[in-house]
Image (spheres, grey):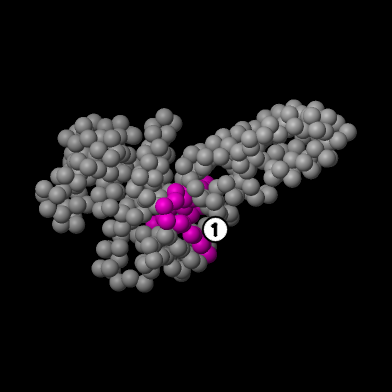
Amino acid sequence: MIEAVGLRKVYRLKDREVLALDNVDLHVRQGEVYGVVGQSGAGKSTLLRCVNLLERPTEGSVRVDGEDLTAMAPARLRAARRGIGMVHQHFALLSSRTVAGNVAFPLEVAGVGRTARRSRVMELLDLVGLADKARAYPAQLSGGQKQRVGIARALASEPKVLLSDEATSALDPATTESILELLRELNRELGLTILLITHEMDVIKRICDSAAIMESGAVRESGRVLDLIGTPGSLLARSLFPLPPTDAPDVVALTYPRSYDEPLMSELTRKFDVDVNVLGGAVETVSGQSVGRLNVQIRGANRDAALDYLGDKGLLVEVAA
Ligand SMILES: Nc1ncnc2c1ncn2[C@@H]1O[C@H](COP(=O)(O)OP(=O)(O)OP(=O)(O)O)[C@@H](O)[C@H]1O
């Protein structure tokens, strides 16, 4: 759905150059929620702006829905951009227009007639749960409601792809949760492909099917979230499920890359006669699977056989050095 290949972006300043993207590839499948995560300055916003060509990459190509945006003349590019919605961190609403007026704005620009516009705006407000706020002004809304307006406006031109630039960073945790829930629903119900950037690991855990970790303009790791969690040495797994340091003896870090029906820990104690003590960690639902990482102390004469057993079951077993 989104195929970016070999993206490089160099910003030329007066006295120096900044390499914001360094040979970045991105493959976002149709109908998935894809998260790009990284610290400030990693190049996430530049990547997002290069995907809809708000920023022209210095090198590389971007295809959205099979069309090469980088090769398009300006008029065709403007038309193609209507198929890509964008949601902003600070909402970017017009304060002098009502909620309905904000959502109607892209429809007006696209030349949609008044009657069709009105019914489309009400449909969109209904979709984001704001049908009763059509006549309110942005200043009368909460942050979460403003973002719902931003999302409705982004969907006005019926895009196939939604780009989200830190859509929840300015919101409190409960509101973040409800906006993420809304994005997930829109993804499922409309088949909308969502590419989001975030600095919050929790966003990846909550709604992303796939993810990329960026650092210094480059992608360090990318793929399906569950696959990455099951990959030895994964940065994503460590970032999603950080383990507190421990100096207790005989501790192993266990990564569960999927749900298990069988009670593995009690099987260990029964089959191998070892003592098992969970010291810390977290197990959470990601893409419908219970996955996580735990620090577990395993002691007894058959410890090595017990660890092999867990490895055979598909757990990642990392023995502290
Ligand atoms: N218009 C610009 N001119 C010059 N340098 C820029 C410009 N935009 C971004 N940069 C630089 O490019 C690098 C990547 O910035 P970018 O904003 O893409 O990172 P980011 O991961 O989105 O960070 P943040 O979350 O803080 O926005 C940084 O070093 C930044 O200073």
Q: Nearer the viewer, residue 95 or 189?
A: 189
Local secondary structure at mark 1: strand
Q: Is residue 115 above or below residue 175?
A: below
Q: Is residue 33 magenta?
A: yes
Q: Is residue 172 left or right of residue 275?
A: left
Q: Position of residue 314 (x, y in %)?
A: 69, 45
Residue 38: % across, % down: 52, 48
Q: Is residue 151 above or below residue 31?
A: above
Query: Residue, x 46% and y 57% (percent of image)?
Result: 28
Q: Amino acid at mark 1?
A: Ala
Q: Is residue 205 visible?
A: no
Task: Give the extent of the magenta segment.
Answer: 23-49
Q: Is 299 displayed left or right of 213 in the figure? A: right
Residue beneath the point at 60% across and 34% down = 283
Residue pointed to by mark 1: 218
Q: Any magenta on residue 157? A: no
Q: Tell me where residue 109 appears, x and y as whole percent.
A: 18, 55
